[in-house]
Amino acid sequence: MPTTLLSPFAVSSWFAAAVITCAVAVAPHGAFAQDVKDTQYDTIDAALKAAKAAHEPVLVDFSAIWCHSCWWMKTNVMNGAQWDALGKHLVYVESDADSADGEAWMKKLKVTGLPTYVMLDADGKEIGRIVGEAKRDEFYPKIDRLIGGADTLEKLKSQAAKGSPTDVAQALDVYAAREDYNDAFAWYASLPAASRQQATQNAKVALDLEAMHMKQDKHDLSSAKTTAAKAAFARSCVEHGQQALASKPDYDDRIDIIDTLSDCSADFPQAQRKALLAAPIAAAVAQLDAQKLSIRPLPPGSRDSVLILGVTSKAIGDEAGSKTIFDRGIAAYRSQMDDGKGGLDLKKDRSASDDLYALYRFSDHKEQKLALLKELATAYSDDCNYSLIYGKALLTDGKAAEALPYLERAAGMASGRYVLRVANARAQALIALQRRPEAERVVAEALEKAGSWFPKDKEDLRNVLNAEAKKVS
């Protein structure tokens, strides 16, 4: 099992959500053996049909072209002989999270982060899942256990009821991957008293429980309706966070705790947030190079560490510390992608390229960010992602004429909800260039293509025309 229940996606989801992106049809991950060789199923249902015929489970890879962790997994883990050999034992389907099918299945399976790898039996029942980035020596043993049925939640719960704290921790990991925190607490409370007493003495179980309470408090805080309720959930989250820090977490867990503490204390006075976060940040910063930035290739969680420490340092008033953290991260990524000629080999590693862009973006390096975006739009001209991002950046700077060619390129490759989002940007550019009839056609075509899906994006697209009409009137 993974050494931590804290999802890498949970650490960085708000950074990913803040980036304007687009999706395209995703190609399969290399060749698989036997029936799944060179096969990419259009839907998860199609994969399940093939799995039933072959009497095999299905591995659903929920990913997206904008997901840097998905690219990290493709580059560093999901390739080679181990990956190819999986085709002898399962049916694989890659599901675009921004497609109608992907969105529907993510809701059905309660998938909230990318990447998430869900193993289903041929009837569509979940066997287990892996959330976020995982090293090769973690990913494949876990997949093997899921294929063999060893890590189903029911089996792990059965073992935990009469087993060791390690068994308890494994069951908690499964609950955490599904974000079923309240179910986890209820199950834990139902264990025999002797099992609970033994488990609470285990450092990992103690950390897992505190971390899960933090996550649940954070969720409840976000949906609380009253000021008093929000304050109560924030206090509870902070208390559990302090207990989690006291349990001497490893580096990645410490980063996740800092991130959650920062979110839960967002409404605290800055002095109070500083008193809460300064020491854990300092401890993490002291380990940053040894744990992440000095390792090549940069390991999982490198970008998240820099972003969380940099942004949180700025939030508590340490501008200089924030700048230093971002500069260290940028230097590490530039070093990894150095082409030996004073430039960057952006095609070498898509994940690292995306990570570098994110660091420039959140560190307010505007000129460097725009220059890098232009390079990325050129290097990755065969997908719509960076063409859309760069076009949006130019549009924001009032350069609609320069933006339009990039947005039109993106439109030719977009799919799913990003048909609507690219159309939104194109319509804005056309209106700025006094070409409203063309903007109306772009909007109408995108709305027709979207059908009944993605109502919020359709509303936003219609509002582009409505807002302009109100200005004219």
Image (cartoon, rainbow, N blue to C red):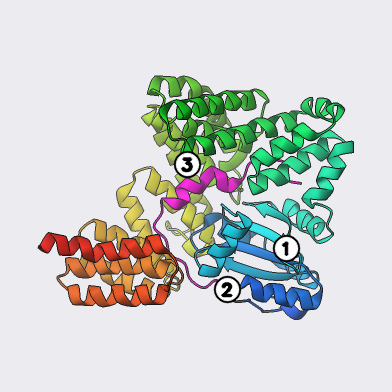
Q: Is residue 132 magenta?
A: no
Residue type highlighted by circle 2: Ala
CA gap, disc 2 and disc 3: 29 Å
Mark 2: give few (<14), some (14-19) or many (20+) Cα within 10 Å. Answer: few
Check disc 1 and report the residue beneath it.
Answer: 120
Per the image, label 3 sits on a secondary structure element best described as: helix
State which quadrant residue 40 falls in. Answer: bottom right
Q: Is residue 25 above or below residue 386?
A: below
The percent coordinates of residue 262 (x first, y second) are 48, 32
* Start-end of magenta stretch: 1-27
Q: Nearer the viewer, residue 439 or 283?
A: 439
Q: Is residue 18 magenta?
A: yes
Left/right placement of residue 131 relative to residue 326 reads: right
Residue type highlighted by circle 1: Leu
Mark 1: give few (<14), some (14-19) or many (20+) Cα within 10 Å. Answer: many
The percent coordinates of residue 471 (x first, y second) are 13, 60
Per the image, label 1 sits on a secondary structure element best described as: strand
Q: Residue furthest right?
A: 162
Residue 399 visible, this angle: no
| Residue 102: numbered disc | none
Residue 420 visible, this angle: yes
The percent coordinates of residue 468 (x first, y second) are 18, 63
Dominant secondary structure of the residues highlighted in magenta in the image: loop
Check disc 2 and report the residue beneath it.
Answer: 27
Q: Please report whichever mark, 2 or 3, sits nearer to the chain's N-terminal start.
A: 2
Residue type highlighted by circle 3: Leu
CA gap, disc 1 and disc 3: 34 Å
Foreground tag (2 vs 3): 2
Q: Residue furthest front?
A: 225
